[in-house]
Image: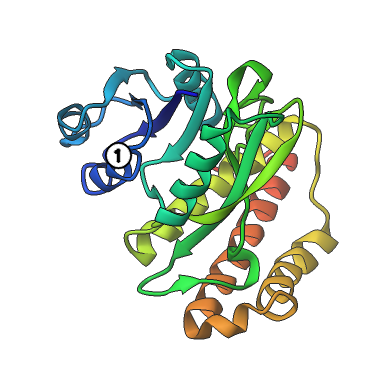
Amino acid sequence: MPVSACIITFNEADRIGDCIASLAFCDEIVVVDSHSTDATVEIAQRMGARVLQRPFDGFRSQKQFAIEQATHDWVLCLDADERVSDALRAAIEAERAGGFAGAAGYRFARLSEYFGKFLRHGNAYPDRVLRLFDRRRGGWRGTREVHEAASVDGEVRTLRGDLIHYPYRSLEQQLLKTQRYARMMAEHDFARGKRATLGKLIVSPAWRFWRGYVLRGGFLDGWHGLVYAYVRANYVRQKTIMLWMLQNGQRVA
């Protein structure tokens, strides 16, 4: 059963090579690039990927476009900062050998590296994601362009092995990225009629920290887990504040 790997990129020259290398078992690699200004396109083409250019209009839209350009109906979707581990590759190949019989898609755990340590507890892990699926039965659906998720009609199975994730180049980059995502989510929620309350402003960030760091054992990851929990709680705080500002007629960007 042939599989197309689909990746979206923008200025990922330092990471796209390792991503594509981990997908060597796939029958095709499609890269949809948002007009990178670094060597992303050249590296991807040199490694055998088929590269298409498309202006960025949202993560979900970009990923849906990518799977629509694939040659094969079974697609494996990755971001440039992700790699398929050996264990996950073996699990995927075993299912492929059986023709993906009876399944519409597969989810697997995502293991994130955080400034020198892989986080194995808290809200960071296992962070299961649906990334391998039959595009005839689903895709990147809905209207939310950030924190997008694929869905399928049919049975979804869980595979062993991890999708290795290298999400942040620096703390500054993480803070800027989470602020951008917070704004996008606040705008999305506001457009859907969702509203912030004074209670949510106070309680939601504290609950995110407590749930991840204490209830889910984020403290077991040491200081890395502590910093991660604080930053994620701050994301919730930013998103709620921005939603509060929007509903009170204020600009957030």
Would residue 161 be visible to someone looking at this image? yes
Quick check: 30 above or below 164?
above
Report which quarter residue 52 is drawn in: top left
At a point 33% along the width and 45% down the height, the residue shown is: 22
Dot 1: within a 10 Å radius of its alpha carbon, few (fewer than 14), some, or many (20 or more) residues?
many
Residue 96: % across, % down? 52, 33
Residue 160: horizontal and vertical position, in percent?
A: 58, 55
Residue in the image at 36% along x and 26% along y: 27
- Where residue 236 sits, quadrant-wise, is bottom right
Q: What kind of element bears circle 1?
A: helix
Front residue (pair 124, 183): 124
- Name the one closer to the observer, 1 or 214: 1
Image coordinates of residue 54 in percent, x first then y, are 36, 18
Residue 58 can be seen, yes or no: no
166, above or below 220, in the image: above
Q: Position of residue 133 (x, y in %)?
A: 59, 30
Seen at 58% across and 27% down, the residue is 99
Image mark count:
1
For image coordinates 75% across by 61% down, the residue present is 201
Q: Say how the picture is coloured.
A: rainbow
Name the one closer to the observer, 38 or 136: 136
Kind of residue at badge 1:
Ile
The quarter holding residue 45 reads top left
Q: Residue furthest front?
A: 98
Horizontal side of residue 218 vs 119, given as left or right: right
For the residue pair 175 and 41, the one nearer the viewer reads as 41
- Residue tagged by mark 1? 20
